[in-house]
Amino acid sequence: MSENPLTELDLQSFSHSLSKKDRSADEQFDILKSMYSRFAINEENLIRLEYALDLKRTEDDYFEQRKICEERLNELKTQYKQIENRITAAEQKLTRGIPDDLELMDKLIAEQESIVSEQEKLNIAETALIKEFSTIDITYGKALEKLDQILNNRISPLLNKFKVYLESIE
């Protein structure tokens, strides 16, 4: 196949060349083969352009989803730091010794239970977020595979069709 795609100017030139009466049938046939070959390049370029657009859309969606998850992960990290600060504060209170006041002791125990409960919730949220990251990555990989398959399913028959057609007319 020719390397140059078919342009509108080329179509006008082909039309003009084919309308000349002084051209032999072989010359006109060669012009038609050239035009058809270049038309095949246009078809292939169109398919590749559609693929590139679909790929860009898929990548943009993937990166947007990853960005959202990363923001949520950063929020979790902030919450973990807040819990660490609360743990440090509770430990500092205990370094002074176990309080004799039962009310104060109950508050410390309640604070520690609250911290443990929040840590468990954060751990569950982090696990869910990691699964979501994994799902996003798997979905993206499958989408890329599907796009490649679609491209191959469209390009291969197209190239074969043009090749068979050119062989059949020769």
Image (cartoon, rainbow, N blue to C red):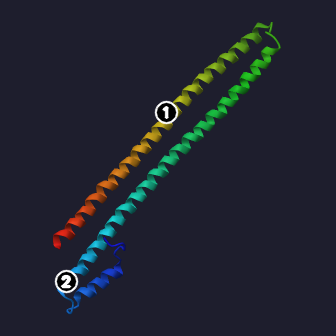
- Image coordinates of residue 111 in percent, x first then y, are 70, 18
- Image coordinates of residue 143 in percent, x first then y, are 40, 47
Q: Which of the two residues, 168 or 17, is positioned nearer the viewer here?
A: 168
Q: Specify the label residue 60 is tagged with.
A: none
Q: What residue type is labelled 1?
A: Lys
Describe the element under mark 1 as helix, strand or loop. helix
In the picture provided, is 157 more to the left or to the right than 145? Answer: left
Judge whether 14 appears above or below 136 on screen. below
Describe the element under mark 2 as helix, strand or loop. helix
Disc 1, disc 2: CB below 8 Å?
no
Residue 68 picture quarter: top right
- Residue assigned mark 2: 26
Judge whether 160 appears above or below 34 on screen. above
Q: Distance between the residues labelled 1 and 2?
A: 65 Å
Crowd band around label 1 with a 10 angstrom C-alpha radius: few (<14), some (14–19), many (20+)? few
Q: Which residue is drawn at 64% across and 33% down?
A: 77
Residue reaching furthest to the right: 96
- Residue assigned mark 1: 131
Q: Which of the two residues, 144 or 118, is positioned nearer the viewer here?
A: 144
Judge whether 27 appears above or below 169 on screen. below
Give the label, 1 or 2, closer to the camera: 2
In the picture provided, is 98 more to the left or to the right than 153? Answer: right
Q: Which residue is drawn at 76% across and 22% down?
A: 89
Judge whether 62 appears above or below 111 on screen. below
Residue 41 picture quarter: bottom left
Q: Residue at x 34, y 79 (%)?
A: 8
Please report whichever mark, 1 or 2, sits nearer to the chain's N-terminal start: 2
Q: Which amino acid does label 2 sit on?
A: Asp
- Image coordinates of residue 76 in percent, x first then y, are 61, 33
